[in-house]
Image: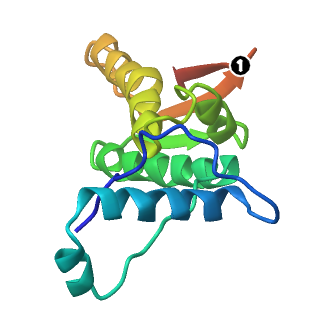
Amino acid sequence: MTSNAGSERKENALGFGKVQNDANKDKAMKALKDFLRPEFIGRVDEVVFFNDLTEENYEEIAVLMLNELKEPLKDKAIELAWTDDVPKAIVSKMDSGVRGARDLRNVIRRNIEDRIADIIIDADGTPVTRIDVSVSDGDLLVKSA
C-alpha cells in the first residue's frame, strides 16, 4: 500500500541537526497516525519513506524515458539520438518538480514525442531514418537527420 499522507502539509519541521528527508519522514509518520487508526498501523510490518528526488535523479530518469522511445522507433527503422545536454534541458522544463517524474513524462511527450510524430507525418512518404534531439538557447530541438 502506498500513501501520500502528509504531502500536502507545508509546515516547517526542520530543527537542529535534521535534514529535509528526516523532516519529511517525521511529517509523514505524523500524518499516518492522524489518517489511520492505531489498530491498523500496528498490523503494518514496515513503513518505507522515499527521499526527495534530486536534479541528478530527474536527469537519470529522463534518460531512461528517452531510452523507452528508442525501441518503438527502431521498429519503424528510425534511430533516435540526443546530445548530452538534453536530459538537463528536460528537467529545466519541469513544473518545479511538484508532480515528480510525471512532469518529466509530460515534458518529453509535449517537446519530443509530439514533434517526432509531426516529423514522421510531415515526411509524406519519405522514409525518416534518424531523429536527433538537441538543445539551443534552452529549447529542445527535434529534427530529422
What residue is at 61 percent from the left and 35 percent from the top?
91
Q: Is residue 99 left or right of residue 88?
A: left
Quarter of the picture containing the N terminus is bottom left
**Image position, residue 90 (x, y; %):** 59, 32
Q: Amino acid at mark 1?
A: Gly
Q: In which quadrant is the C terminus drawn?
A: top right
Q: Where does the image place residue 119, in percent across and percent down from the top left?
A: 38, 18
> As drawn, is 114 to the left or to the right of 50?
left
Quarter location, residue 132: top right
Front residue of 116/77: it is 116
The answer to which quarter of the image holds residue 121 is: top left
Please report the residue visible at 35 percent of the width from the left and 21 percent of the height from the top.
114
Q: Is residue 92 left or right of residue 114?
A: right
Q: Which residue is denoted by mark 1 in the rendering?
A: 138
Q: Position of residue 66 (x, y in %)?
A: 48, 46
- In this rendered view, identify the residue nearer to me: 115 or 125: 115
- Asked which colour scheme the image uses, the reply is rainbow
Residue closest to the eye, 39 or 50: 39
